[in-house]
Image (cartoon, helix red, strand yellow):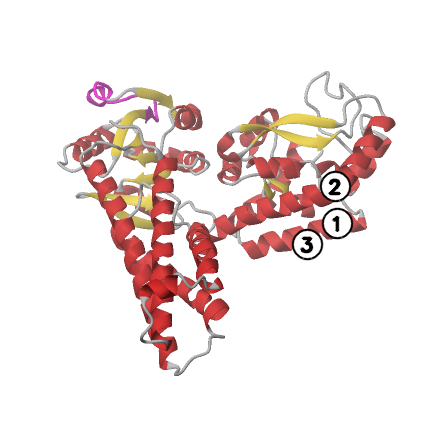
Amino acid sequence: MKEKRPRLQVVKYMSSDYLAALFAWILFFIFRKKLVISDITNLDILTSGEPTLIFGIIFIPIFWILLYYIAGEYDNIYHKSRLKELGGTAFISLLGVVIIFFVLILDDDIVTYRNYYKSFLYLLGVHFGLTYTFRLLHTNATAKQIQNREIGFATLIIGSGEQALKLYNDITSKPKSAGEHFVGYIKINGSHNTELASRIPCMGTIDNLIEAINSNKIEEVIIAVEPDEKPKLQEIIIKVKSTPVEIRAVPDILDIISGNVRMSSIFGVPLIELSHDTMPAWQANIKRLMDVTVSAIAICLLSPFYLIIGLCVKLSSKGPIFYLQERMGRYGKPFNIIKFRTMIVDAEKYGPALSSDGDPRITRLGRFMRKVRLDELPQFINVLKGDMSLVGPRPERAFYIEQIVQKAPHYFTVFKVRPGITSWGQVKYGYAENVDEMVDRLKYDIIYLENMSLYLDIKILIYTIKTVLEGSGK
């Protein structure tokens, strides 16, 4: 089986979209000129060096690429449906042409308003036609490779009984593949079907489910449980939804699964597809663009303050300016969070310990910095690197996560998103002084996950700024 190269696939789509937008704009420019000057030749138009043509050749394709990115057209690049792509390309083409006309075209000198309608329909038809034709070629080639089992998606079965074996046999016996490449299965209650074990390897139990998914680069999970294993479903779903995988399940567990579900059919094998996206693709992409843009601007504007704060930290107490600490990020992957140091050196020489209001380990300057959140400023670097977001659940250490999960197993759901510099829990609750307070603060993060939107992010950022200016943080 060939190795998938998603970045190369994205480049192919972006390149064809760029060329389609470029050719469409040139043809549209010629069409518009001929509407006004009927006897002008194509060569005269293209060699006239008009600023509109040059501007369009440089910037219009970039505009389209950005619009497609925001709309999520380059996400899940190997999972494209030709029918959905037809509708998506048509809608985005219409939206983009409307934007172009309002920004660039409506102030043109015209003979009759009918020329506007002709121009609009011409650009829409040519742009959509070229774009979808190129995309269809890519999508057809990919679909053929998937159906012929030349490429596939690493798939893990959760379950080891008769249901799991039947599912495996049903899918692998189909003449055309839907992309599932089974790499193993997970045991639930300890026992497993010997026939299934002879075909694919066992990758552990649900206790090490997240580790198995991450270490084996699993892309899809299919839940196939036996009747006596249903009590474990909630734990399984909570853990799987904290990972980036696609999740499906056999239909007979529909009555005990809550949330947004839809039916999916893999060449005759009906499965329930569990939706686990926290935001629509376009909002998620705008959120990431906002993260990068705001962080880059913040680092540039705050660089003098970084120098001043760094100098104050250095002069106020012995030790380094910055403090790096391993935290658990999106999908449970560790990263080093960057902060201005607010504690004395070797503050945790006797092991991890949370801070409190009267904590003697916190320096005098550190106490002030924590109150107005100045110690968090270097985390804009984490945001640029992709470890964090501006808004999201605060990241914790593995040491404390193990304790939190004992009291609140649903903590795993916060791994669905990037952790944030600020969060609803941070604004409403502040720093937690013990595990119980971490669990109490968790409810705000869960509410945030269930209601994620750009509007809510902006609202949390405003409240964070208000907390900083008032110095009312805990």
Q: Which residue is mark 2?
A: 373
Q: Amino acid at mark 3?
A: Ile
Quadrant of the frame with the N terminus: top left
- Cα separation, mark 1 vs mark 3, equals 9 Å
Q: Is residue 67 above or below residue 401?
A: below
Q: Which residue is mark 3?
A: 462
Q: Nearer the viewer, residue 164 or 312?
A: 312
- Cα separation, mark 2 vs mark 3, equals 14 Å
Give me the residue at 36% from left, 45% from top: 15
Q: Amino acid at mark 1?
A: Thr
Q: Residues within 10 Å of mark 1 (few under 14, many from 20)?
A: some
Residue 355 at x, y = what percent?
Answer: 74, 30
Q: Is residue 255 above or below residue 26?
A: above
Q: Nearer the viewer, residue 415 or 166?
A: 415
Q: Earlier in the sequence, mark 2 or mark 3?
A: 2
Q: Is-magenta flag for residue 11?
A: no
Q: Residues within 10 Å of mark 3 (few under 14, many from 20)?
A: few
Q: Are marks 1 and 2 in contact (CB under 8 Å)?
A: yes
Helix, strand or loop status at disc 3: helix
Q: Amino acid at mark 2?
A: Arg
The answer to whether 261 appears left or right of 323 in the picture is: left
Range of the magenta residues? 186-199
Q: Which mark is residue 172?
A: none
Q: Residue furthest top?
A: 350
Helix, strand or loop status at disc 1: helix
Q: Is residue 42 above or below residue 296?
A: below
Q: Which residue is mark 1?
A: 467
The answer to whether 150 appears left or right of 40 in the picture is: left
Give me the residue at 78% from left, 43% from top: 372
